[in-house]
Image (cartoon, rainbow, N blue to C red):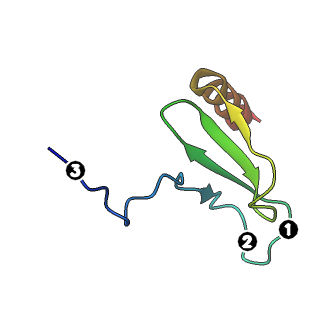
Amino acid sequence: MNAAVSESVSTEPAWFKSSYSGAEGGQCLEVAATSEAVLVRDSKRRVGPVLAVGASAWADFVRMAAER
């Protein structure tokens, strides 16, 4: 049996910018969750480097940031 892969299926992760980020640009990060890690990148350099963080480390970071 042969299964055709749909061209509409993307392997690119869905990136999200913080709701606190304004429309004027500035210093913003985007994050995307995958099954392996949480990915973090500079919203101004979308083809630049990506930081991969384990899910538990990301949860610790978010918890610590929320306490600030």
Q: In this view, does 55 lie above or below 19?
A: above
Relative image position of residue 12 (x, y in whole percent): 53, 54
Q: Nearer the viewer, mark 3 or mark 2?
A: 3
- Residue at 60%, 28% (x, y): give it: 59
Q: Front-most of 19 and 37?
A: 37
Q: Front-most of 46 and 65?
A: 46
Relative image position of residue 53 (x, y in whole percent): 68, 30
Q: Earlier in the sequence, mark 3 or mark 2?
A: 3
How far is mark 3 from mark 2, CA to CA?
43 Å
Disc 2 and disc 1 in contact, CB within 8 angstroms: yes
- Residue at 72%, 64% (x, y): give it: 21
How far is mark 2 from mark 1, CA to CA?
8 Å
- Residue at 31%, 56% (x, y): give it: 5
Q: Residue 26 carries which label?
A: 1
How far is mark 3 from mark 1, CA to CA?
44 Å
Left or right, 5 with reference to 33: left
The three-letter amino acid code for the residue at tag 2 is Gly
In which quadrant will I find the N terminus? top left
Q: Which mark is residue 22?
A: 2
User: Residue 22 falls in which quadrant of the image?
Assistant: bottom right
Q: Is residue 34 above or below residue 26?
A: above
Residue matched to label 3: 3
User: Residue 58 falls in which quadrant of the image?
Assistant: top right
In which quadrant will I find the C terminus? top right
Relative image position of residue 15 (x, y in whole percent): 58, 56
SS for tag 2? loop
